[in-house]
Amino acid sequence: MNKPFNEPMNQGRFETWTTRPEFPIFHAHQVHGTDIASPETLPCEADGIFVSWEKLNLPLAIKTADCLPIAIEGEQGVIFLHAGWRGLANGILAKPEIEMIKPKNVMIGPSIKDCCFEVSADFKSNFPDSPFFREIEGKLFFNLQEEAKRLIMKRFPQVLVQMSLNCTCCDERFHSYRRNKTTERNWNLYIKG
């Protein structure tokens, strides 16, 4: 098993594996939506998992190939999200479950960065208020991580947000759909303790 990313958080740690771990985990069938499930409702279609600290007895897992894995630690528990551009545009970071845990710390894990996330001009309509578009040599690029941070800080200005410096498209230690259309996924884990 290869662990190319490991970052401590306040209540636990964030890890990214390039293959599925061989130990039990909580994970949902991700569909690029905005639903957040609890372990009691798994398996189900969802793009987030919410667990109170008392019930967090297995690692939480989110699969990505360029999208954002976002771990949110709060006073009442943890939420682990899969957030691509569709999830961000459709409000996954505005879900009431996030407010319920009273968020304190956020980690945005390895994901595509604006060096590689080229978008079309009409893509701007998904994020009309975002300052995170930039043009390079006539091509338009978008910073998904910074937009996620902006959306989090807008709702919860007291939260500490950390972001991985790793671009899944540039860094070949990670799987990237944008780089080579792979069907493989990065297994992002939140592990308590």
Image (cartoon, grey):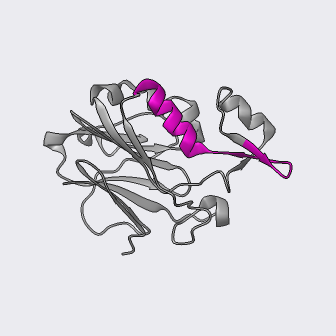
**Does residue 16 lie above or below 120 as drawn?**
below
Residue 115, how many percent across, how many down?
67, 56
**In percent of the image, x 32 and y 46: which residue is there?**
43
Toward the viewer: 45 or 146? 146
Q: Quadrant of residue 53?
A: top left
**Does residue 26 lie above or below 150 as drawn?**
below
Toward the viewer: 170 or 182? 170
- In the image, 153: left or right of 102? right
Toward the viewer: 13 or 1? 13
Image quarter in which the N terminus is found: bottom left
**In percent of the image, x 43 and y 69: which residue is there?**
4
Residue 191, how many percent across, how many down?
26, 55
Look at the image and tell me whether residue 65 can be seen.
yes
Image quarter in which the C terminus is found: bottom left
Residue 56, how many percent across, how many down?
19, 46
Toward the viewer: 111 or 158? 158
Question: For residue 145: magenta?
Answer: yes
Q: Residue furthest right?
A: 138
- In the image, 157: left or right of 102? right
**In percent of the image, x 37 and y 39: which residue is there?**
160
**In percent of the image, x 33 and y 26: which residue is there?**
99
Residue 165, how many percent across, how many down?
51, 58
- How many numbered marks are there? 0
Look at the image and tell me whether residue 45 can be seen.
no
Question: For residue 62: magenta?
Answer: no
- In the image, 9: left or right of 166? left
- In the image, 91: left or right of 124? left
Q: Quadrant of residue 42?
A: top left
Q: Which region of the structure is painted magenta?
A: 134-156
